[in-house]
Image (cartoon, grey):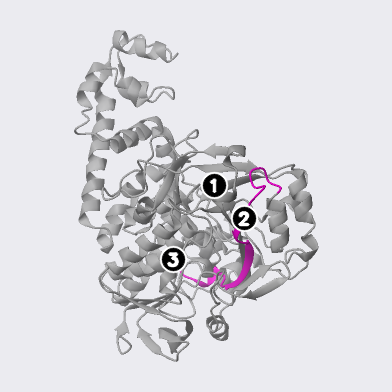
Amino acid sequence: MFDKVYDVIVVGGGHAGSEAAAAAANMGSSTLLITMNLQNIAQMSCNPAMGGIAKGQIVREIDALGGYSGIVSDTSAIQFKMLNKSKGPAMWSPRVQSDRMRFAEDWRMLLEQTENLDFYQEMVTGLLIKGAACCGVKTSLGLEIKGRSVVLTNGTFLNGLIHIGEKNFGGGRAGERAATGITEQLIDLGFDSGRMKTGTPPRVDGRSLDFSKMIEQPGDPNPKKFSYLDRTQPLKAQRSCHMTYTSQAVHELLKEGFERSPMFNGRIQSQGPRYCPSIEDKIHRFADKERHQIFVEPEGWNTVEYYINGFSTSLPEDIQFKALRAVKGFENVRFFRPGYAIEYDYFPPTQLSYALETKLVKNLFFAGQINGTTGYEEAASQGLMAGINASLSVQGKPPFILRRDEAYIGVLIDDLITKGTEEPYRMFTSRAEYRTLLRQDNADIRLTQKGYELGIAEESRLKRMEEKLKNTESLVSFFRKQSVRPEVANPVLESKESAPIKQPGKVFKIFSRPNISIQDILKFPDVKAFISPDVFDAESLEQAEIQVKYAGYISKEKNNADKLTRLEYVKIPKQFDYSQIKSMSLEAREKLSSIKPQTVAQASRVSGVSPNDISVLLVYMGR
């Protein structure tokens, strides 16, 4: 293998690296996944869960495109919840608790069954650069492995430094060494770099906890799943999580360690995740709050290890232990491992193109935490896109780019390369201006055709999506055409305290009422006769219901997207000289010269660029 020239070399075997390797190999590229420890492929370094607010939409998009995260999330799930069901469908977000060991094993097995994919265990310490292009990697043993493209997915390993109280030591994860050499070389090549921080809570022995003092958090009564494929099935049994709270007594115990905390004594100066703060940060920033939620999450079907979500910390281990013992239900807790913080190198993502290829070095792609993101899902989606685009680059084809109105993945990448990030970036539904279009239920309709054309989504996926789309359109068309008489409709409407109709009306209009469900209109004989369970599955019915109830919102948002999309096709020349546009603000000229947006639409989203600046730019470009 060492004399082989690979099409794609993926460095790092986390969530980003695993998706990148799978995508490139499934597109027919000879691919090498090289990582420091093959036993830890797709390791869940932090919480044992996939999905959540906006993150669940990303997992479904990865699955729709032909990635593996949705499949593995289903096969390793121990609990399923659809979050935000009390809100509109744009906010519904699937989430699973995962069996940590099974998750990594299932990923490993899927990768080993993937054609065109080789594996190698060793540390990559540098890149092979020829001219302004990357052509391979160098390892700690001095090997040089040639590749036509390289995808870096180094996670928290680049010069990783772990902090527990006064102690700190090099490491990319607890029990694993840091990676060295790559940062220094990239800086020598002209890249800007920075430091970020993330953390993780203690893991404890579930046999030492008193769950009777906690609030049980079961999964959904009728659980669904992530993958659109029939090869995975919804859970028949589930494990519960539990919830408890900190208290003022717990907070006082934690404060005893603040002087020894690397966060407060200045040893950690890098930026941590705003939306997932450590417990010491929470009680410092929100001093008025008497308590904070603690979620007690099982790490698998059979293990007794539990993850203490909400108690992320880098305080000394004795303080962690003493404070956690003051939490209700934790009076006799035994630790498996303490919590810790980790600092690591990242590279501001404004140095990347939409393809996630670096602007300075051709054929070099970045994905995951190296780009300043946090979260398995964000990393996996970048890995998928980087793997796709590395493969396309080798094949001499144009890059695959998703717009903001096409996918949360498109929002994520556009945010990163256009705005950059100075703190770990996490996806939220509020970041997507077209979230009514980007629902978790229609990711297959939005993206499966694209995945099929790329060669990573198999034909069975496409056929399943086309069947769902045909059924949905058939149902919506029927609702628009079918009328119902007052004597048939009114008993149902009155039972739902909904205004009766005085003359025959279309089922579509009645169904669009917010308090009328699919079960209600099935009480109309003509509707019941049309909707045969043998033809229309639950997924098609749900999709049709959303299309009816939110037709106005969807249409309005689509029109807005279409208007703004026109600017996505107005390309800006690569060597465009913004300094010549004197009527544009100085800040806009500086920001646009630095980021070098590819389109006018992207330029309009750069922080500090005003609508007036865009008008000036369009005039200057002859528009």
Say which residue label 2 marks.
334
Question: Gap between marks 2 and 1, in whole Å?
Answer: 39 Å
Q: Observer-nearest residue: 472 or 66?
A: 66
Sequence order check, earlier mark of 1 and 3: 3
Q: Secondary structure at mark 1?
A: helix
| Span of residues in magenta | 326-354
**Is residue 281 among what the camera can see?**
no
Question: Gap between marks 1 and 3, in whole Å?
Answer: 24 Å
Q: Observer-nearest residue: 246 or 464?
A: 246
Say which residue label 1 marks.
430
Image coords of residue 258 (percent x, y): 78, 60
Q: Indicate yes or no whether the magenta region holds residue 496.
A: no
Sequence order check, earlier mark of 2 and 1: 2
**Do tag 2 and tag 3 residues touch (Cβ < 8 Å)?**
no
* Amino acid type assigned to the residue bearing label 1 in the image: Ser
Q: Residues within 10 Å of mark 3 (few under 14, many from 20)?
A: many
Q: Is residue 360 left or right of residue 280?
A: left
Q: Is residue 61 above or below residue 139?
A: above
* Of marks 1 and 3, the one in the foreground: 3
The numbered disc on residue 343 is: none
Q: Residues within 10 Å of mark 1 (few under 14, many from 20)?
A: few
Say which residue label 3 marks.
16
Q: Secondary structure at mark 3?
A: helix
